[in-house]
Image (cartoon, grey):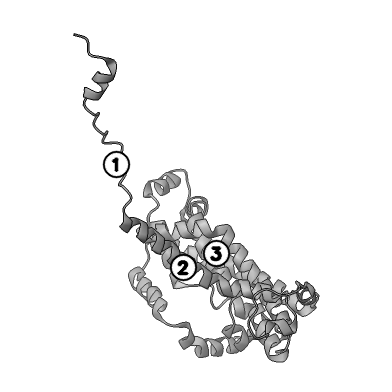
């Protein structure tokens, strides 16, 4: 007796699910509500974080009266470029941006150099009192910067470094947190690579330059951006050590502008937006590397 094809298909047992194919969990009300709540919370957090930046940038297109108008109005009635044009035409503001950017680049390069050398020494070299010195270095991470401002000011004063670009760059170049971060990365580099380089005739310094530095892009990105942001956003230390308008830093300039020309808030918002633009652009360019490296450091 021949069984029809359709009947045989109905009678055939269902094929078992392959172990390699995960079963899809059915959507439940609880899962949907959880996803909705997470989305709403994320939108609220992002809005709260971006709203001040958006208002600052848009306020630069308003007139003096619109910035302080009551009731609050987010968008201007007429979009004006005069504030941005006027602040960019100010030679003092442009000079401040140039000096701050130049100093930030020098500070970043020096920070990468000093901290990577120290990290390599603590990760791979053997020398006297190594563990004791490492404990001392790590201990400085727990000292608030504000507690040593006065002693640091006395030191740079005796070294005749006031009103120079060096007083902004040299004191903060070495950072225990950066040394620790880079050292953790170096500890995970296989020693077999180092041994192969030694067989090829490289010394300790050559191994660092030819092996460790090319492999150090992940921690260098994080440390470099952090150093740049620290220098760019510095305010207290420049106010204490810089009195010459020719060396004013961008945050110092904006604070002086606000105290001397408090009625021109729209112009101040335009200048603040231009001052924040390099930091935002830098983060947008390297955001993937920053997040990936932070995750990697957390796993290690």
Q: Which one is nearer the viewer's eye here, 242 or 11? A: 11
Where residue 23 is drawn, which disc sits there? Answer: 1
Where residue 105 is drawn, which disc sits there? Answer: none
| Secondary structure of residue under mark 3 | helix
Q: Going by the image, does 184 lie left or right of 244?
A: left
| Secondary structure of residue under mark 2 | helix
Q: Which one is nearer the viewer's eye here, 161 or 253? A: 253
Residue 25 x/y as whole percent: 30, 47
Q: Which one is nearer the viewer's eye here, 242 or 160? A: 242
Residue 2 x/y as whole percent: 22, 10
Q: Which residue is mark 3?
A: 224
Q: Going by the image, does 144 lie left or right of 17?
A: right
In this rendering, which labeled residue sits more in front, label 2 or label 1? 1
**Image quadrant of residue 133?**
bottom left
Where residue 178 is drawn, which disc sits there? Answer: 2
Residue 60 x/y as whole percent: 71, 75
10 Å neighbourhood of mark 2: few (<14), some, or many (≥20)?
A: many
Quarter the N terminus occupies: top left
- For the point 69% across and 72% down, the residue is 274
Extreme-top residue of the structure:
1
Q: Which of the two labelled residues, at mark 2 and mark 3, occupies the earlier sequence position?
A: 2
Distance from Cα at disc 2 to Cα at disc 3:
10 Å
In this rendering, which labeled residue sits more in front, label 1 or label 3? 1
């Amino acid at each position: 007796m021949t069984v029809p094809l359709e009947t045989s298909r109905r009678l055939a047992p269902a094929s078992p699910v392959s172990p390699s194919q995960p079963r899809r969990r059915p959507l439940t009300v609880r899962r949907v509500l959880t996803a909705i709540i997470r989305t709403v919370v994320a939108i609220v957090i992002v809005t709260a974080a971006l709203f001040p930046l958006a208002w600052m940038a848009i306020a630069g297109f308003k007139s003096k009266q619109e910035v302080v108008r009551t009731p609050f109005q987010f968008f201007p009635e007429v979009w004006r470029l005069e504030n941005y044009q006027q602040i960019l035409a100010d030679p003092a503001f442009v000079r401040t941006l140039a000096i701050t950017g130049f100093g930030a680049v020098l500070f970043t390069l020096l920070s990468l150099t000093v901290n990577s050398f120290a990290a390599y020494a603590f990760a791979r070299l053997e020398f006297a009192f190594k563990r004791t010195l490492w404990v001392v270095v790590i201990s400085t991470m727990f000292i608030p910067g504000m507690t040593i401002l006065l002693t640091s000011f006395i030191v740079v004063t005796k070294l005749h470094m006031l009103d120079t670009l060096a007083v902004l760059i040299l004191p903060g170049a070495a950072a225990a947190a950066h040394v620790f971060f880079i050292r953790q990365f170096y500890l995970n580099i296989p020693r077999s690579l180092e041994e192969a380089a030694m067989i090829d005739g490289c010394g300790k310094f050559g191994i660092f330059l030819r092996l460790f530095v090319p492999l150090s892009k992940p921690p260098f990105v994080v440390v470099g951006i952090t150093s740049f942001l620290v220098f760019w956003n510095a305010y207290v230390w420049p106010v204490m050590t810089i009195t010459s308008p020719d060396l004013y830093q961008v945050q110092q300039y904006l604070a002086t502008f606000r105290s001397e020309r408090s009625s021109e808030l729209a112009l101040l918002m335009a200048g603040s937006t231009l001052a924040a633009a390099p930091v935002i652009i830098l983060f947008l360019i390297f955001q993937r590397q920053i997040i990936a490296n932070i995750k990697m450091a957390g796993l290690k």
